[in-house]
């Protein structure tokens, strides 16, 4: 039997080697290896984002429709008055509104501690979602939709100002208002994810052929509530460009406008990819209807892809109808919608995301 390497005083007979010095940054923590399509960054929408659409079924408010380009607010986000508050570090904490106290007559919001309370933010949530704005400060306007929902936002509130930010990804589902705790017995939605890579299809508008407007139509100083842009920006993700200036060319570098919609970052064939780049345009498609879809019988008034949409994909049909209703000052017929698409005024844009 081998002898233990200790003498009678329990002193080791061999020298002990100290633990390696870990102060040189050689331990870098966990490494997530993935395809980078959807990073593991669960996020809550910012509490005070305006309601853009009301869900017909749940009657909840949607604050960002799927396909919106988003930015992330973290604990490093500027806390300037013109920017929404960042997600503070635990030592500073803070509170978020939860619900209106039913025991008091006047509005008296119950608040939750961000780090310590159930209706605060989960420990794993390190960021909040807001629309990207292409690197220019923007404002988000409240409307009567906020009054209908009756949560933390209202039409009487001043616009929500967002400082210049950088894009982080695209939300792949509708993002609902964060109303956790507003009702004691109801919670349908929680954290959200987003995509950095992949292929996305959204409607497009050639502003050289249709009077459409732009993101400036939503800002106080240049407000134009009668423009087609203003009519659709809350409800749809889309891409708009001027075909008169090389817009819509394959390979074009794309960025975000003030509300997370796709626009050309530049029209030159040598436009560089920057921190504001969101994707690369692969093609604009106006070749509809096709594949005999126009012969598929759908119930009149259902507006489901088929005979009721004249064979136009429902996503494009609804968007085109909304745009043309403004530009024509009348609800367009199916024939007018098909004609506008086949003339290249509207269609579907195929975009490769290049974030992350």
Image (tube, rainbow, N blue to C red):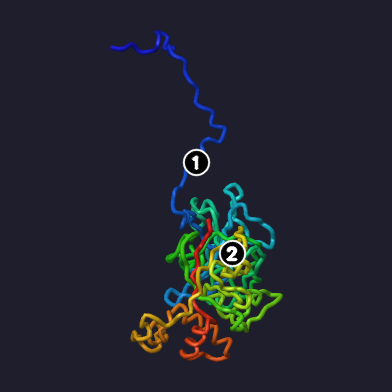
Q: Looking at the image, can residue 70 be seen?
A: yes
Q: Earlier in the sequence, mark 2 or mark 1?
A: 1
Hey, which residue is sitting farthest top in the picture? Answer: 8
Q: Is residue 147 left or right of residue 17?
A: right
Q: Residues within 10 Å of mark 2 (few under 14, many from 20)?
A: many
In which quadrant of the rendered view does residue 323 lie? bottom right
In which quadrant of the rendered view does residue 256 lie? bottom right
Looking at the picture, tell me which residue is in the foreground, 193 or 126. 193
Hey, which residue is sitting farthest right in the picture? Answer: 221
The answer to whether residue 156 is above or below residue 180 is below
**Image quarter (top left, top right, bottom left or bottom right) of the N terminus:** top left
Relative image position of residue 345 (x, y in whole percent): 54, 82
Q: Looking at the image, can residue 109 be seen?
A: no
Looking at the picture, tell me which residue is in the foreground, 92 or 163. 163
The answer to whether residue 206 is above or below residue 87 is below
> What is the number of callouts on the image?
2
Hey, which residue is sitting farthest front in the picture? Answer: 269
Secondary structure found at label 2: loop
Q: Residues within 10 Å of mark 1 (few under 14, many from 20)?
A: few
Looking at the picture, tell me which residue is in the foreground, 325 or 92. 325
Task: Measure how far apart labels 2 and 1 are at the Cα level.
Answer: 30 Å
Residue under the image location 53 percent in, 31 percent down: 22
Residue picked out by circle 2: 132
Relative image position of residue 190 (x, y in whole percent): 46, 61
Relative image position of residue 351 (x, y in whole percent): 50, 67
Q: Is residue 38 left or right of residue 129?
A: left
Residue picked out by circle 1: 29
């Amino acid at each position: 039997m081998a002898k233990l390497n200790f003498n009678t005083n329990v002193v080791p007979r061999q020298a002990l080697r100290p633990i390696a010095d870990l102060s040189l940054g050689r331990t870098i923590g966990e490494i997530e290896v993935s395809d980078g399509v959807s990073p593991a960054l669960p996020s809550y929408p910012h509490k005070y984002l305006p309601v853009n659409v009301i869900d017909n079924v749940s009657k909840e408010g949607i604050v960002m429709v799927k396909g919106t380009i988003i930015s992330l607010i973290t604990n490093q986000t500027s806390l300037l008055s013109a920017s929404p508050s960042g997600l503070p570090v635990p030592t500073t904490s803070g509170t978020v509104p939860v619900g209106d106290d039913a025991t008091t007559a006047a509005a008296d919001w119950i608040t939750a501690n961000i780090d310590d309370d159930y209706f605060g933010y989960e420990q794993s949530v390190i960021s909040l979602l807001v629309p990207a704005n292409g690197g220019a400060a923007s404002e988000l306007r409240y409307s009567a939709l906020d009054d209908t929902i009756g949560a933390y936002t209202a039409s009487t509130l001043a616009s929500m100002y967002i400082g210049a930010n950088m894009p982080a990804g695209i939300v792949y589902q509708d993002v609902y208002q964060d109303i956790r705790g507003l009702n004691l017995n109801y919670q349908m939605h929680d954290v959200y994810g987003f995509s950095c890579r992949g292929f996305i299809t959204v409607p497009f508008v050639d502003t050289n052929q249709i009077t459409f407007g732009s993101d400036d139509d939503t800002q106080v100083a240049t407000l134009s509530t009668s423009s087609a842009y203003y009519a659709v920006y809350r409800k749809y993700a889309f891409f708009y460009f001027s075909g008169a200036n090389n817009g819509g060319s394959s390979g074009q570098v794309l960025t975000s406008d003030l509300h997370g919609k796709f626009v050309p970052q530049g029209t030159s064939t040598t436009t560089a990819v920057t921190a504001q780049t969101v994707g690369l345009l692969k093609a604009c498609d106006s070749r509809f209807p096709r594949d005999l879809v126009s012969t598929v019988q759908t119930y009149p008034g259902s507006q489901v892809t088929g005979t009721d949409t004249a064979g136009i994909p429902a996503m494009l049909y609804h968007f085109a109808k909304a745009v043309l209703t403004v530009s024509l000052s009348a609800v367009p017929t199916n024939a007018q919608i098909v004609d506008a698409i086949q003339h290249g005024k509207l269609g579907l844009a195929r975009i490769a995301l290049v974030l992350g």
